[in-house]
Image: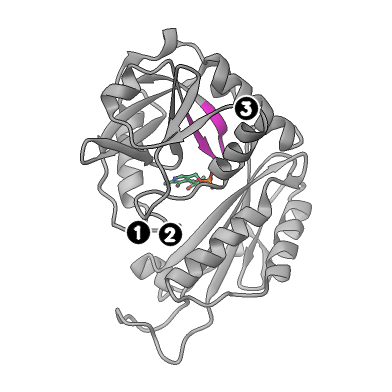
Amino acid sequence: MVRTVFVNGEYLPEAEAKISIFDRGFLFADGVYEVSAVVNGVLVDYSAHTDRLERSLRELRMDWPCSRTELEAMHFELIRRNALQEGIVYMQVTRGAADRSFNFPRPAPKPSLIAFTQSMSLVHNPNAATGVKVITTPDLRWARRDIKTVMLLAPVLGKQEAYEKGAHEAWMIEDGFITEGASSNAYIVKDGKVITRGLSNEILAGCTRRALFRLAAEHGVEIVERKFTPEEARAADEAFLTSASQFVMPVVEIDAQRIGGGQPGPVVRKLRELFLAEAGA
Ligand code: PDD
């Protein structure tokens, strides 16, 4: 089946989808994005993603490409046209196409909106049974990581370093503390309590993180928001990461050191189960 993608108002076979070489997303990474999970053909936590999109656009003084209703309808239509049962919808908005200049073009071009689906195994992701390995690496990103921009070169390099070392994710370090993963939020568990960095401009406010906080509160799992060091992480009872495409994913090795005997622990297994149940898995 040929995948149908969305580009600036049109549904097209992926080979026919085109974006201008003057698009500011391409020239300046002047754009924002969201990744939403789909389980059993249904979007998971979609409104949290549009809330964050709204904030990202506002922070960068970018216009909405369409109404919220149209954006949601577009998500539904892409899922329908691609008969997507499980996977993700990726959507990206940029400031549009105009002759190259650093300042915002005036008159403002129409923002570009593109989206596509990717079929993926999320619920029975084999990594969840074994847990994944992470490495630590310096955090090379800019100071506004709370905005979900497409400027992802530092995470690309971090993730590549992880893959080359046989690991799955890179946990990034700044001033001696772990900020977050290249494309996920980072957590450790000690004495039954979950520890994760508090929200600020230094990390992305994950939608999965937000859902996790609510589920943990409902089921009596304590979460402490504070920074932690790589040393503390390596001595933790359990570790895990969260993202829209991985849900709650156990981490069993940090910098080649086993965590909790190298098996997913009870707290992370429980939190993943709660998340899956809510996602309709
Ligand atoms: N990444 N932190 C960073 C730096 C991320 O890129 C992501 C998500 C998260 C988790 O956010 P959420 O739970 O809303 O997915 C945290 C997406 C999945 C990606 O870039 O593919």
Q: Amino acid at mark 3?
A: Gly
Can you give x and y, in whole percent of width and height, for residue 158 in the image? 31, 39
> What residue sits right under mark 1 in the picture?
144
Of 148 and 89, the residue lying toward us: 148
Quarter the C terminus occupies: top right
Decide whether the magenta segment is chiefly helix, strand or loop. Answer: strand
The residues tagged by marks 3 and 1 sit, at their Cα atoms, a distance apart of 33 Å
Which residue corresponds to mark 2? 147
Image position of 18 (left or right of 73): left
Q: Amino acid at mark 1?
A: Arg
| Residue located at (76% from left, 46% from top) | 42
Q: Which residue is disc 3 drawn over? A: 220
Let me know if residue 244 appears in the view: no
Q: Picture quarter containing residue 253? A: top left
- Residue furthest left as drawn: 175
User: How many labels, in total?
Assistant: 3
- Residue 226 placement (x, y as % from top left): 37, 37
Camera-nearest residue between 281 and 88: 281
Judging from the image, the colouring scheme is one colour
As measured in the structure, the alpha-carbon distance from the residue carrying label 3 to the one carrying label 2 is 31 Å
The stretch drawn in magenta includes residue 248: yes
Residue placed at 50% from the left, 19% from the top? 192
Q: Is residue 119 above or below residue 76?
A: above
Secondary structure type for disc 2: loop
Q: Find numbered disc 1 in the image and state the secondary structure of the residue it sits on.
A: loop
The residue shown at (61%, 73%) is: 8
Pointer 2 local density, CA inside 10 Å: few below 14, some 14–19, many at least 20: many
Residues tagged 1 and 2 counted as in contact (Cβ below 8 A):
yes
Q: How far apart in space, not on screen, are marks 1 and 2 (Cα)?
A: 6 Å
| Marks 3, 2: nearer the viewer | 3
